[in-house]
């Protein structure tokens, strides 16, 4: 009854939100979950303007995913473990799913078939060690996997959607899940407090941001082991790889900057200062533009990846996390 009443209220609020009619087909919107105030900020990428906020609850999860057809957003309520499915065009909440656990990371397989939702937190306990799998065809939870690591957070996938790599922040390792069988098939040891990872464009290497170490672990996918460690900034939290695969970008919470790392040289070639606690980073598709969420200053830094300069700043909600881009069809 409690959740039903909440859902009704949220649908009424969300249904009143209509995006600006100035958004044209083929353009992108950026969606950012704000954990501190339970909202999702909507940014018009073409104008670099905040155009809407979708209220979800008191808090939202740190992850966010978009369906392959660009029609639905998957977000969640952090402590209550509710997954919210939101219509992209109207902002209305279409449905909810109760995972029964904490909800941290939310990511979708490249083929769009499955959502992986993790229960991790910055603490240990059996209740934080689960991964819920949602089938997007009918939006239902089809399996719950108990992780072989402690406190799984964010997830990355091979481009063929065959394997998932799940960062376990409290056990310094990565769980590898076979997406076909939905079973954990191996574990890879990395640095302390691995929060987020991203594969190289050719899927040969996984780059892992280790918060406690301030490093990036380089994992050889074929060997299934860490083969190198690269120094980054302090509190390395988020990671992205340039489209040409030559540069790693990390967000560093404690040093309030982004490290630009030359992959061949395995060293920092540039540091970019941001306003406060650089958190997550995402590269706009088919572009040389990156968006960075800043946890403490509650804004987005837009970075030109040719000049490595901050070219704009957008004020958004409290404690922003991942950034997901949606192409308007």
Image: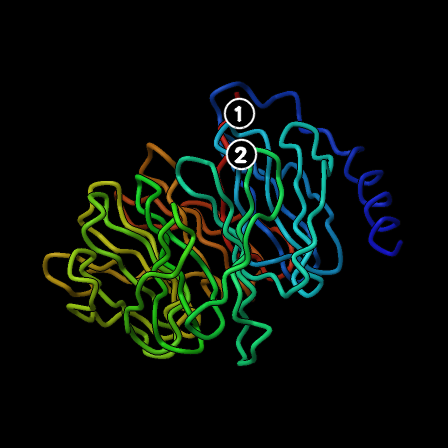
On the picture, is 144 further left or further right than 206? right
Spatial distance from mark 1 to mark 2, Cα to Cα?
7 Å
Residue at 40 percent of width and 57 percent of height: 183
Q: Residue at image x 56%, y 33%?
A: 137
Nearest to the observer: residue 37 or residue 311: 37
Q: Is residue 187 above or below residue 76?
A: below
- Asked whether, in this view, residue 113 is left or right of residue 2, the answer is left
Residue 200 is situated, as x and y percent measured from the top left of the image, at 23, 49
- Crowding at dot 1, Cα within 10 Å, few <14 / some 14-19 / many 20+, comes out as some
Q: Position of residue 228 (x, y in %)?
A: 16, 69
Circle nearer the N terminus (1, 2)? 2
Q: Is residue 219 above or below residue 149?
A: above
Q: Residue furthest left?
A: 265
Q: Nearer the viewer, residue 158 or 33?
A: 158
Quarter assignment of residue 89 = top right
The x and y percentages for residue 288 are 31, 39
Mark 2 residue element: strand
Instruction: Using the image, tell me which numbered label, if any, was put on residue 170.
Output: none
Q: Mark 1 falls on what kind of element?
A: loop
Q: Nearer the viewer, residue 250 or 49?
A: 250
List x then y, in percent, for residue 118.
53, 60
How many marks are shown on the rendered structure? Answer: 2
The image's colouring method is: rainbow
* Disc 2 residue crowd, few under 14, some 14–19, many 20+, Cα 10 Å: many
Quadrant of the rendered image containing residue 193: bottom left
Q: Which residue is mark 1?
A: 328
Left or right side of 298 for 188: left
Identity of the residue drawn at 64% across and 47% down: 40
**Mark 1 touching mark 2, by CB under 8 A?**
yes
What residue is shown with label 2? 29
Residue found 66% across the figure and 63% down from its top: 36
């Amino acid at each position: 009854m409690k959740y039903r009443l909440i859902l009704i209220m949220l649908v009424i609020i969300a249904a009143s939100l209509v995006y600006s009619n100035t958004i044209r087909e083929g353009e992108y919107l950026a969606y950012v979950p704000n954990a501190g105030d339970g909202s999702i900020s909507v940014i018009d990428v073409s104008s670099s303007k905040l155009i809407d906020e979708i209220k979800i609850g008191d808090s939202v999860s740190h992850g966010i995913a978009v369906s392959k057809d660009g029609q639905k957003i998957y977000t969640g309520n952090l402590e209550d473990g509710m997954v919210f499915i939101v219509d992209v065009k109207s902002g209305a909440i279409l449905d909810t799913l109760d995972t029964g656990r904490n909800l941290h990371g939310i990511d979708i397989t490249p083929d769009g078939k499955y959502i992986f939702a993790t229960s991790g937190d910055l603490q240990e306990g059996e209740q934080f060690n689960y991964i819920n799998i949602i089938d997007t065809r009918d939006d239902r939870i089809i399996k719950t996997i108990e992780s072989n690591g402690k406190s799984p957070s964010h997830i990355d996938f091979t481009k063929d959607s065959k394997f998932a790599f799940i960062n376990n922040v409290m056990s310094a390792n990565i769980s590898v899940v076979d997406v076909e069988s939905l079973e954990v098939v191996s574990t890879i040891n990395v640095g302390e407090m691995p929060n987020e990872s991203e594969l190289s464009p050719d899927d040969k290497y996984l780059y892992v941001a280790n918060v406690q170490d301030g490093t990036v672990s380089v994992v050889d996918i074929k060997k299934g082991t860490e083969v190198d460690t690269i120094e980054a900034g302090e509190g390395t939290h988020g990671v992205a790889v340039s489209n040409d695969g030559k540069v790693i970008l990390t967000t560093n919470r404690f040093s309030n900057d982004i490290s630009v790392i030359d992959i061949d040289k395995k060293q920092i070639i540039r540091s970019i200062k941001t306003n406060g606690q650089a958190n997550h980073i995402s590269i706009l598709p088919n572009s040389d533009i990156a968006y960075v969420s800043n946890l403490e200053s509650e804004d987005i830094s837009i970075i030109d990846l040719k000049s490595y300069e901050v070219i704009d700043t957008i004020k958004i909600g409290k404690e922003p996390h991942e950034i997901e881009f949606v192409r308007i069809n």
